[in-house]
Image: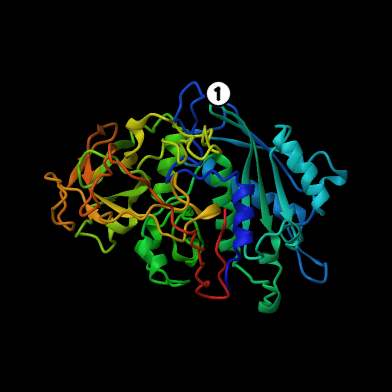
Amino acid sequence: MRRRLSGIFLAYLLTSGLVFAGGPLIVTGPGALQPGQAFVWPAAVAIHYTVDSGPLSVNPSGQTVITNAQGLARVQSLFQNWQSVSTASIAYAYAGPIAGISGGDVKTIQDFNIVKGSCNSGTQSPVIFDADGSLLHALGLDPLVIGFSSTCKLDTQAGHIMSAMILLNGSFQDGVTNATTNNFELSADQFDEAITHEMGHFSGLGHSQINLDLFQNGQVNNCNVDELAGLPLMFPVAFCQSRKSAGLPILSPDDTAWISKLYPGATFASTYGTLSGFVFFSDGITAVQGVNVVARRMDDPSTTADESKRIAFSAVSGFSFTGNPGQAITGDNTNGSSFGSRNPALIGYYEIPVTAGIYTIQVENIDSSFVGGSSVGPLDPPAVTYGAAEYWHNYESAFDNAAQHDLITVQAGQKISNVNIILNGTPPRFDQFEDGEVRLGPMEPFVFRPSRTPSLPRTLS
């Protein structure tokens, strides 16, 4: 099955086109009191949400498979996954059925538009049950979209999320598998993970990329448990077996670290330290935006588990800087994006919360297929940077051994800065005083790879 370009593009619009990093979903722009800060829900206030009053899932014959009561209980319990993170301070509260439409059951595109309008105005933050996938179809989205989330209203000066929404595709739980109609099933645990993923976006989290080799090697439903343990729930696509079926908690270490950083609880500072630094091109001067930085715990040889795969945390360089600073040359993009700092000192900066331990630091490119609603970091499409596949060590240079690495010990509450990485073999810096012209080549269409199996759709959100 191939993900349709139109479906991905529309999903991108519905999520506001703003997925900044392994970390925050959106960061504040130049008009904010503190540019470059993560958008979060206001502190000390439970996040109130409303829920569709219809069934969560019906089969093609119209028979209810998952009732409203079951769906509501499921939503409430899955929000609890984020609320229960001991080092975070975030809370959610059910505020009743969706308001603004008769009965609170969102059945038609007209209903959806009314409810989306109320979300845009900040009136409510709805969770919509698309019981048979018909709303996604009416929106022009791919039937393989498990769900999506959208920030609706933002306080761009204070950096607060004021309202947001989630839509869940109940056709993945209708008990029917029909490849002809693109109706596929997920296990209850896999679907719950997809819901919880959307709740992460709803809370202000972006996508994270860790243990990318699982995805690139075509692993499906049989992922190595050590690597699955470290694979973020906020990874852009769903392809492994459920974490629960492998005996793992629903949230990875990276997930719990970032929800805690955005909403620090009383024990955050006594649990996490911080690693930060800059990524540079080979000149050692020019900062690189859009490179993934991963801190991996050193493996403990006394255990059977591989801690270097299980305990890992990430951020994208330049996640606080805008992905579109604007330019006046063409006359159509003078101001660029309204989101992201314009401070050039942040272009190559990364900052990663980590639990106490001994770590290696490595850099890598963002996977080229992570675009639109599946993007990771501030650049969409992601930049492909030559040399962005190496470890940090004490004697960084543009000509070092990419596999050589040194260890960094981090204590809880400790902030270790200037862990800087110089990429190997990148092209020379463009001379800002160079004469001549820069020609743009023809647009190249992006071709999406087929899904690796017809039974496991990818999560686009």
Quadrant for residue 402, please give it: bottom left
**Residue 80 seen:** no
Q: Is residue 32 left or right of residue 148?
A: left
In-front residue for pair 356/168: 168
Which residue is most to the top? Answer: 33
**According to the image, label 1 marks what residue?**
157
Q: Position of residue 428 (x, y in %)?
A: 23, 48
Q: Is residue 104 above or below residue 140?
A: above
Which residue is most to the right? Answer: 102
Which residue type carries mark 1? Gln
Q: What is the basis of the colouring in this image?
A: rainbow
Q: Is residue 264 above or below residue 437?
A: above
Quarter that holds the N terminus: bottom right
Identify the element where label 1 is drawn.
loop
Q: Is residue 383 left or right of residue 51?
A: left
**Residue 309 seen:** yes
